[in-house]
Amino acid sequence: MDLRFGDSKPTDEERDAVDALLGPPESSWEGGGDRAGDLRWARGGREARERRDLLLPGLHAINDRIGWISEGALAYLCRRLTVPPAEAYGVATFYSLFAVRPRPTTVLHVCTDLACLTAGSAGHGRAGEPAGTGHGGTDGPGHATHDGTDGPGHATHDGTDGPGNTAHHGTHGPGDTAHHGAHGPGHTPPHPVAPGRELRGGEELCVALRDRLGPGSGVDVRPSPCLGLCERAPAVLAVRAGDPVRTAVAAPAGVDAAVLAATSPGAAPEEPPAARAVPQAGQDSLVLLRRVGVVDPASLDDYRAHGGYAALRRAFALGPAGVIREVTESGLVGRGGAAFPTGRKWQATAARPERPHHLVCNADESEPGTFKDRVLMEGDPYALIEAMTIAGYAVGAHHGWLYLRGEYPRALRRLEHALTQARARGFLGDDVLGQGYAFDIEIRRGAGAYICGEETALFNSIEGRRGEPRAKPPFPVEQGLFGRPTAANNVETLVNVLSVLTMGAQRYAAIGTGRSTGPKLFCVSGSVARPGVYELPFGATLGELLALAGVRDGLRAVLLGGAAGGFVRPDELDLPLTFEGTREAGTTLGSGVVMAFDDRVPLPRLLLRVAAFFREESCGQCVPCRVGTVRQEEALRRLADRAGGASAEGDITLLREVGRAMRDASICGLGQTAWNAVESALDRLGVYA
Amino acid sequence: MTAVPLGIPRRLVEVSLDGRPVRVPEGATLLDACRAAGKDVPTLCQGDTLRPKNACRVCVVEVEGSRTLVPACSRRAEPGMEVRTDGERVRHSRRLVLELLASSVDLSTTPGAAGWIEEYGARPDRFGPDAARVTEEPRVDNELYVRDYAKCILCYKCVDACGEQWQNTFAISVCGRGFDARIAVEHDAPLPESACVYCGNCVEVCPTGALAFRSEFDMRAAGTWDETAQTVTTTVCAYCGVGCNLTLHVQDNEIVKVTSPHDNPVTHGNLCIKGRFGYQHVQNRD
């Protein structure tokens, strides 16, 4: 390719960031040294272009170091990878975590999504509740001291989360949530935002934070879609560019905790252990979550001492076909939302003659209200690595790709550490467990795009292209990542495979119902006393789950499946939580989101947030979704703002017609489900009736 | 050698279109089948010289067994498919796509749009006066062609023609996301600062007039553009030995636009800067 890279030059720091990822340039064709000498020969062609998949890691490298991506940095990265600058610019502008204009080194992502939105508004005025966010700045110093007393390791954590620091995590049991809950609005706010003013959700937290930080603070406060920290809503994530990039999470976040995270991410208190998100942690009945809070997530030995790598040994004994047979007989279906039979997917991939095959783990958990995969990855990272190895073995892949959500820094650290350990100990590499099977895993970070959870968009993202979904057919099992047969599975699905193999298909299939087998994780948040990830066998009712989580009085609605799911009424609590049960009831289980809203939460505001979410996250490729999500939001805004007495009929008709076209004619699941929640609010909850 | 490429003989597959059997060569799309059967299916992002992008979704049809509607332009015909091309469900989505597009961008120079809007009963104004629109000023940054993104429906055809499907220049890409997505060069710079080689192959495939010859843009602004007064003459480019066909669009004895026949085996509609824009010497009368 005869590419034009322009005249912009990278700064030394930008060049260094790129070279740290790619190594020094080999010639001036890649932007290095001796131009006159190198012009006597040419380097290019397929070999140079086939590194396109390093574009996204390269953009991350620059963004992590500098905080934004300048023209010179982009040009240098393009030269290194032989990528047209226009295309790289298209990719960089696709992802919300990247900026192509100068901005402060620290970005404070403030969750404005459903759980955080209601944590702000619903928490107000209720003394003694754990959210502790009812009033501006109330959690103040309490949050920091609370974490500081929590254990010897916490106070010293600097955001790099080395393996040694995590050892104590296993000591935290479910009782910790109550301890956490002791911090209510009782603290005296040292810097009240405004006397008597309540914080209502992330957007207003944004305003308060901008007020507090003031101009020139070096912190860019940005509203963010769901950060996957709903059990500790409201949440903020601070990212400070540098070498190394530093991150800090404050959740539940008041103004003080958020400001501390943003201004000194290295000194901010460490997050509570992952087990804190699992109220059932330590219970004998758990299958998927049995190690979370029990094992040290940094220790491979601890993992093995708790049954780790037994499933992989069984897999090697069964052989690839045996594993697929076992998974098929277990009735396991995908847990990411689509509920496709895992065994069939693996069989179809394994049977394809093209090589190589790929295994992709979809850890781009971005559905608002979902955080189960994060808890699994943070609390039991080796389980995912073992499960991916088994899946790779079954489908004939030697390379596993773990596409991890960009907003999950702690999961990234834990997984990177676990991968290093597994490689060093022969659980990954050229000869896994001495069985002659070569397998390794590469983590690829997403960069802020809900759509990349759609599997074909995820492939494009890994390949260094805009994360736009592809047309199906061809399906991923035929032409997936790099055009090759690919099995793409969600984290929870893969972790289930361990139990399928250790328990055997029959025993596994005996859990749950006939058509929805096995245990299921549910992400419960909102108006409940004990939000978190719950594990229940399929078939438990919504009421049982909510009772377990301690649903509060005045329940108005429950959102199942996240923004792409649907609302159900408080009188539908006997709904069985199975794929078939929810389908028959005209709703969906989706990825297992169960978000409870009480009667103090204004439904129109929730619907507006859902609509804004889809409008912001639409990739823009197809017309029904690109424009339809805008029109949906406009109509909902008119309805919410409508003066008393004005007829809602016209806008509801419009919503229905636009929604139907989005569902029927959009390319992918995002557009097809963008109207689900709104429709269910109209039909089941009777909003605007 | 033949003037018309014959290709490898292909098996025929039979599909049912609105209850009537239609036979098309294996590998043909449902759009091919519809056209073979004389059914009118609206298309915008589909290009006869480009691989289907199926982005606009105006060509959707209903296939028995499919949960959603499918784009006719890209879905291949399979034996036994039962396709409905004109049911209420299909007409609803087509109408909405037209309404969504026409309410957000300017379709005044999109051939066929006005007719389809009438045919499907689309009412783009139903979203109210405050409905968000793409508001972009025309970008007049060079002498040869103009980019008016207020008319752009993001069909990706210009990007595909500029990139690996034809020109391999890769000067433009889709940037941004969602409703804010736009076609742009790197850093959204003016064209003369980009990799653009002014082949005009993007203009050739643009379905809406968002990309237009400068001459056409100026004449439209002056109100003198009149396609009924234009003659169209296909000739051979005189610059080099490749033998590209040029189609000269002439109004008032002036060349106002140059295209190339899409079925021409040499060009497939593509030209270089000389064939596309280098015609001034022909009408230099001094």
Image (tube, rainbow, N blue to C red):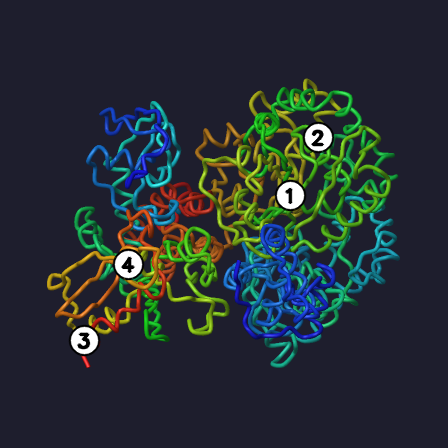
Residue shown at 36% from the left, 54% from the top? B155
Q: Is there one chain holding both mark 1 and mark 4?
A: no
Q: CA distance from mark 2 to mark 4?
A: 50 Å
Q: Residues within 10 Å of mark 4 (few under 14, many from 20)?
A: many
Q: CA distance from mark 1 to mark 3?
A: 71 Å
Give me the disc on residue B208.
Answer: 4
Is residue A339 positioned above or below B113 on the image? above
Q: Chain of mark 1?
A: A
Q: Which residue does the numbered mark 3 point to in the structure image?
A: B222
Tag of residue A406: none
Identity, as a three-letter code, of the amino acid under mark 3: Ala
Query: Of all residues shown, which one is farthest toward the left?
Result: B229
Mark 2, residues whose alpha carbon is within 10 Å: few (<14), some, or many (≥20)?
Answer: many
The residues tagged by marks 1 and 4 sit, at their Cα atoms, a distance apart of 57 Å
Is disc 2 placed on a helix, strand or loop?
helix
Type of amino acid at the residue the image marks with label 1: Gly
State whether residue A578 is above or below residue B96. above
- Amino acid type at circle 2 is Tyr
Say which element carries label 3.
helix
Asked if residue A535 can be seen in this view, the reply is yes
Say whether marks 3 and 4 touch (CB < 8 Å).
no
Residue A393 is tagged as 2
Q: Nearer the viewer, mark 2 or mark 1?
A: 2
Of all chains, the one bearing label 4 is B
From the image, state whether disc 2 or disc 3 is nearer to you: 3
Which of these two is toward me, B34 or A367? B34
